[in-house]
Image (cartoon, helix red, strand yellow):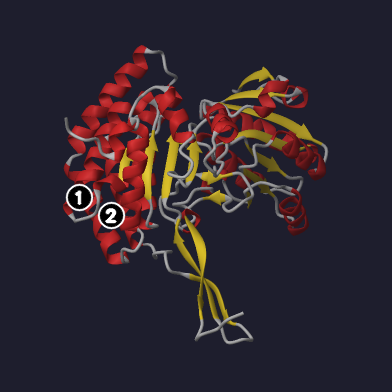
Amino acid sequence: MTSLTPLDNLTPVTRAAHRARAAAAQIAPLPRSAKDEALLAIADALEARTAEIVEANAEDIAKAREAGTSESIIDRLTLTPERVRAIAADVRHVAALPDPVGEVVRGSTLPNGLDLRQVRVPLGVVGIIYEARPNVTVDAAALCLKAGNAVLLRGSSSAYASNTALVEVLRDAIDGVGLPADAIQLVPGESRDSVRELMRARGLVDVLIPRGGASLIRTVVEESTVPVIETGTGNCHVYVDAEADLDMAVDILINSKAQRVSVCNAAETLLVHRDVADAFLPRALDALAEAGVTVHADERVLARAEGTKATVVPATPEDWETEYLSHDIAAAVVDSLDQAVEHIRRWTSGHTEAIVTTSQAAARRFTQLVDSTTVAVNASTRFTDGGQFGFGAEIGISTQKLHARGPMGLPELTSTKYIVTGDGHIR
């Protein structure tokens, strides 16, 4: 009988975590040139094997339609040749970014002559639990690799065929340039048991990052024994101030809501100061109607909807807390900036809020009082994005306040360690 290796007795998920840990040790000390070579190989492979990726994705799309999945989720799930090319371009962008590993965060020479440096180092093994969007598979793998980490990817069963094809492409690409293929792995299994096991892999997995709906994120945060960087849902607000440029406000509103409705930085609530409600709302409601958006309106918005093209329904208390991810928006009239802030503080998910105003005082007060990851002044909520911020493809948008907040790029995928250099120093 053949003797068992230590890994043979373990579950598939635990074996994958052990392999990831071994791969992380090999990836961590690599120079930037080796990691960039691997990323460029990934980008080339994605383009070369687009047909098989799209074919696998078609399986997931067909199953989703059979299951009656909403069009907004299907949009997130879909990979077209154009989207695959865009994903490959994002990977090349990550390759062009500075390597955070080894960056000196701070350093000094202590009074006793010791040289002290705090430097960025990889986190180690990063687990990603996410829903529907197969582009996250590549974004997460690319960012983790650039930051010197191994990654364990647990997408939803709805994207299983797509993710399997993508991870095969990624693993083949990095293996072809001499990096360990196990630095990028799809967590085995489609059941929730594999998710639970990943959440319990403390000591093997260094950090978990959930990306998806509120239920998924809450489950990971509450049940994981592995440290979690909490990403959040996007109940984002646009507030049109008493001193707003109304042409600008219409443009920002429509872009924030309708440019792409299925993403977390799309606006879900419109707040309008009473002083401009009569002038602004008829224009805004017509523009929303042209964009196909249904308005869930309070009484004061309903009163101003007569004669417009808008599809308007009375708002319920649930509307104010809803992340629609669809062609819907809640809308209310407020008496003051402070009332707008009070509404946002009560209902926001802490993602992104925008104010449209020509008043510097109003902008300053809004940015001081609103406590979200991103506060935009005279700009669309859609800019809250790692790529738009120049970070490269983001791994998520953190709505917590520890370690990372807002779009998470490469530095957020590192930790730090202190290097103390002496010359025979003793204490």
* 44 versus 253 height, above or below: below
Which residue is denoted by mark 2 in the rendering?
39
Residue drawn at x 76%, y 50% is 369
Closer to viewer: mark 1 or mark 2:
1
Task: Report whether residue 131 is seen.
Answer: no
Identify the disc placed on residue 347.
none
Q: Position of residue 95 (x, y in %)?
A: 32, 59
Residue 246 falls in image quadrant: top right
Q: Position of residue 382 (x, y in %)?
A: 52, 44
Circle count: 2
Residue drawn at x 20%, y 50% is 175
* 171 versus 308 height, above or below: below
Count neighbours of disc 1 (C-alpha within 10 A) and say few if under 14, some if 14 to 19, many if 20 or more.
some
* 282 versus 67 height, above or below: below
Q: Are marks 1 and 2 in contact (CB under 8 Å)?
A: no
Q: Nearer the viewer, residue 103 or 280?
A: 103
Which element carries disc 1, helix, strand or loop?
helix
Which element carries disc 2, helix, strand or loop?
helix
Specify which label sits upstream in the sequence, 1 or 2.
Answer: 2
Identify the disc placed on residue 175.
1
Q: Nearer the viewer, residue 284 or 376?
A: 376
Task: Report whether residue 73 is seen.
Answer: yes
Residue drawn at x 67%, y 48% is 356
Q: Position of residue 294 (x, y in %)?
A: 58, 23
User: Residue flagged by tag 1: what amino acid is it?
Assistant: Asp
Q: CA distance from mark 1 to mark 2?
A: 11 Å
Residue drawn at x 65%, y 23% is 296
Give the position of the C terminus as an image quadrant: bottom right
